[in-house]
Every structure is written in C-alpha cells, then in structure tokens.
Amino acid sequence: DIQLTQSPSFLSASVGDRVTITCRASQGISSYLAWYQQKPGKAPKLLIYAASTLQSGVPSRFSGSGSGTEFTLTISSLQPEDFATYYCQQLNSYPFTFGQGTRLEIK
Amino acid sequence: QVQLVESGGGLVKPGGSLRLSCAASGFTFSDYYMSWIRQAPGKGLEWVSYISSSSSYTNYADSVKGRFTISRDNAKNSLYLQMNSLRAEDTAVYYCARTAVAGYDDYWGQGTLVTVSS
C-alpha cells in the first residue's frame, strides 16, 4: 500500500498568515492526489484534485502543487473559517490511502 | 443539489452484522462511482470500499476484505454496505461519497456511527 505522510501534523497560525502543508508519498503517484478539509463533527470537503485543480466553489486562496512523491497545499491568507483538519489522499492505486491529517489551529 | 444521506448505523456486538444504506439525490446516481470511507473516533480517514457505476467493479481495504460487501441499486438511487463479523476496530463514523472516475470524492454524506461493543 502507498503511505502518505503529512507534515506538520499540527500547525498554529494567525488570520492572514500564509501556510503550507506537505504530503509525501512512499512511492510515485504522478498527480493522483486530492486534498480535503474537515471541520469538527462535519464530513470532509473536497478542496483540490489532480494535485492542483481547485474544486468548484473553493476559494482561490487555496492552491495545490506537486507531482510524483511530494505535494503541497497552500492557503495564501488564512481566514477564520479555514481552521480545520486537512487530509491528502492518493488516488494512484488501491487502497486509496489518506494522510494522517494536519490540524490547523488559531494562534 | 447533491444529497447523500446515510442510515443504518448503531450499536452491535462483536461478531454481529449491520447493513448501512446511503440514499442519493440531486444527480444521476447511475452515472457515478460511489465509495464508503470511515473515521474512528478521534482518528483520521480510512478508505473502505468502492463500486463502479454499473456494479461491475468493486474494491475493498484489506482491513474489511471478506467481511464487508458494497452494493448498489441504481433503480432506488441507493448505496449499501453489508458489514459482517464486526470487530471493535470497525467502530467509526461511516461516510458514503460520490466518487469521480479519477477517484476523488466530491460529495459526502453526513455520516452514520457504527459502534461495535459488547
């Protein structure tokens, strides 16, 4: 199975900050990567697919990049509603594994 | 608007069975692949299973293979997960999700909690 490792696991930041979350795959997955946002008690929400394609309706302050084994999710200017947990998921081969999550909290 | 509503969760004893359902609306259900993803309390997401639009192809996580069966009824716009031989480690919120051909899940239900405990 392909393992995904997110870093950091926990991030404390302020409104207006630029933050980057990294997702590393244990083997190459081309651009078959998605990012999700999950708020407490809610279902995950798709943010980005194919590593860098913004899902319809997602604010443009979110962006994704990378290919192969290293990927990043960047939020250009944190808004209060962005404080949540973020997961990456590889879609290259079954099982479609998730990263362990990055919890983004208000400083 | 796309809606996915799970049901069927509850408390079950180890070794027991449960059948989850997911009612879909707001899109042409028969055109889409569907998936189940779970989340143990306080833990991360775990992909469980996937079914193609015509049910011709399914896939399972190793942790549930041989115990869980995914199915769908396109006439009823419904997705199912039959869970047998349940274990304590199957305790989780189970989400159904609409799955694009590329594999990402673009719409999720609100989840249904399954608790396996004696």
Image (spheres, rainbow, N blue to C red):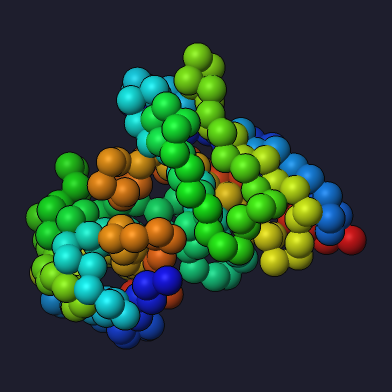
Q: For residue B26, what is the image quadrant?
A: top left
Q: Position of residue B35 (x, y in %)?
A: 46, 44
Q: Position of residue B79 (x, y in %)?
A: 53, 32
Q: Nearer the viewer, residue A71 or B69?
A: B69
Q: For residue B40, what is the image quadrant?
A: bottom right
B27 in relation to A50, above or below = above
B8 in relation to B72, above or below = below
A6 in relation to B27, above or below = below
Query: Residue placed at 40% from the left, 66% from the top?
Result: A98
Q: Position of residue A11 (x, y in %)?
A: 32, 82
Query: Residue placed at 53% from the left, 59% from the top?
Result: B61
- Which residue is outermost to the front? B56
Q: Is residue A11 visible?
A: no
Q: Is residue B105 visible?
A: yes
- Left or right of residue A64: residue B60: right
- Which residue is outermost to the top? B75
Q: Position of residue B11 (x, y in %)?
A: 80, 50
